[in-house]
Amino acid sequence: MKTAMAVLRKDITLELRTFETVPAMALFSLTTFVIFHFGLNRASVKGQLAAGVLTVTLLFAAMLGAGRLFVAEREQGGFDAFLLAPVDRNSLLVAKAAAMFIFLAVLELVAVPAFALLLLGPALWPRLLGLIAVLALADVGLAVIGTLVSAIAIHTRARDLISPIIGLPLLIPALIATARAAGPLLQAHTSGSPPGKWVAILALYDCVFGLVAYAVFDFLLEE
Amino acid sequence: MTTYSKGLRALTLATIGSITLALALVFFYAPLDADQGFVQKIFYLHVPLAIISLCGFVLGGLLAIGHLRTGDRVWDMRSYVAIHMALIFGIGGIISGSIWAKASWGHWWVWNEPTLVSFLIVLLLFATYQPLRFSIEDPERQARYASVFAITAGAFVPLNFIAVRLAQQFVHPRILTLGGGNLPGSMRLTFFVSLIGLALLYATLWKYEMTAKNARMQTRRLRRRLMGEDAVRPLGRSAAPS
């Protein structure tokens, strides 16, 4: 746990000093909203369509961020240093997934209000809590899969290609659940709480892949 | 040193026998479907192909666990061949399903059809297995990463089916419910015989590929010992373990 905290602190410090990943993700999602505005030819969206737009935008922004996750480790020998240290290897997974989760949360602090401002028809306030719950669960899935896929892809020849083509199909169940849970929330009239079935699926997805990632991550680090 | 050719002949004969029996049952024993007529016969090909391909994907994940636990590359080869064969069966399954859908629902592709959609997603995921292997140079690492992928993707198969099935209404006939579905007895018998036949075909093809890979590996080893390290060139860019 101490190791994980140390690596996480390093990642956060690095991000705060360079401002490399999160601003790029945020800019990317703003641009995507503009593209959706013109692509759908609508001034505002609501309901399932709005949920789809938001989910897809966050997904691609997350894939963008996941691609950067291990770049510093690879370029500056962080992997070797980590392997030399007598620490539990899974703490790297925990640290990276936590960093990714924090990046996604910060991204959503920018992207969701921007979405409400630019595209969303109904007001954001009555549905904010439900949306936060759904997005938090989705972020766990995105962070776990993003970390795992990024760790697989970082040592491949075409790593910019490999991580999205593996990541997207793996994330489909989580995205179906996210979009379906957010859909009723973004209707004009909503009860403010997401449908329980989809929240349960999302939680199940997070648990299963959290455990799978924890079980297999070790093997990605051996030299 | 293991050989895979043992029992191959018996397995091949059993496969030929059961597939012949299945074809005979399909064409001469199973009744014509009241609504769909002759086209419904593709069901005896399509459903077993899809089921075996899904089982093959999960099997690939289980074999990959063997690789990561033991560190023996043979397990990786088994997992590779299982996934490779399952992909071929899966493509056959989705094409035959599409033909059936066109004939019975009038469309090549139906979105409100959870089984079809989740199957497509699984195929899309496993289609990245070989590109992933291709892009890793070091054979040790290639085997390890492929196993990690196979395990993750194997766990993905059931979860994906739950999510997609919940997302859509039922259109597809539910054949394999616990009660045996609503198939009449003669159709069910034919279905299970073709399922067994195609499962045997999968096992035979798996064994053939393993035998071929194993034979090639041993030949190369012998040549290397006989003619020196330089005489045997490394295999070109190949994603397959050898």
Image (cartoon, coloured by chain):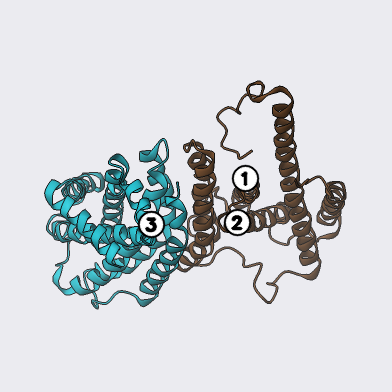
Chain colours: A cyan, B brown
Residue B69 figure quarter: bottom right
Q: Image check: A57 left or right of B13?
A: left
> Would you place residue A4 above or below residue A57 in this image?
below
Residue A205 figure quarter: bottom left
Real-space CA distance between mark 3 and mark 1, rounded to the nearest whole angstrom: 24 Å
Residue A117 image point, x, y percent: 12, 58
Residue under pointer 2: B70
Q: Residue at x 42, y 63 (%)?
A: A214
What is the chain identity of the residue bearing mark 2?
Answer: B
Between A66 and A71, the one lying in front of the other is A71
Q: Which mark is residue A145?
A: 3
What is the chain identity of the residue bearing mark 1?
Answer: B
Viewer-side label of 2, 1:
2
Residue B87 image point, x, y percent: 60, 47
Between B128 and B110, the one lying in front of the other is B128
- 2 or 1: tag closer to the N-terminus: 2
- Helix, strand, or loop for circle 1? helix
Q: Which mark is residue B166?
A: none
Residue A128 image point, x, y percent: 18, 71
Q: Residue at x 58, y 63 (%)?
A: B172
Q: Are marks 3 and 1 in contact (CB under 8 Å)?
A: no
Determine if marks 2 and 3 fall on one subunit. no
What is the chain identity of the residue bearing mark 3?
Answer: A
Looking at the rendered structure, the kind of residue marked 3 is: Ile
Looking at the rendered structure, the kind of residue marked 1 is: His
In the rendered image, the quadrant that contains the N terminus of chain A is bottom left
Residue under pointer 1: B84
- Helix, strand, or loop for circle 3? helix
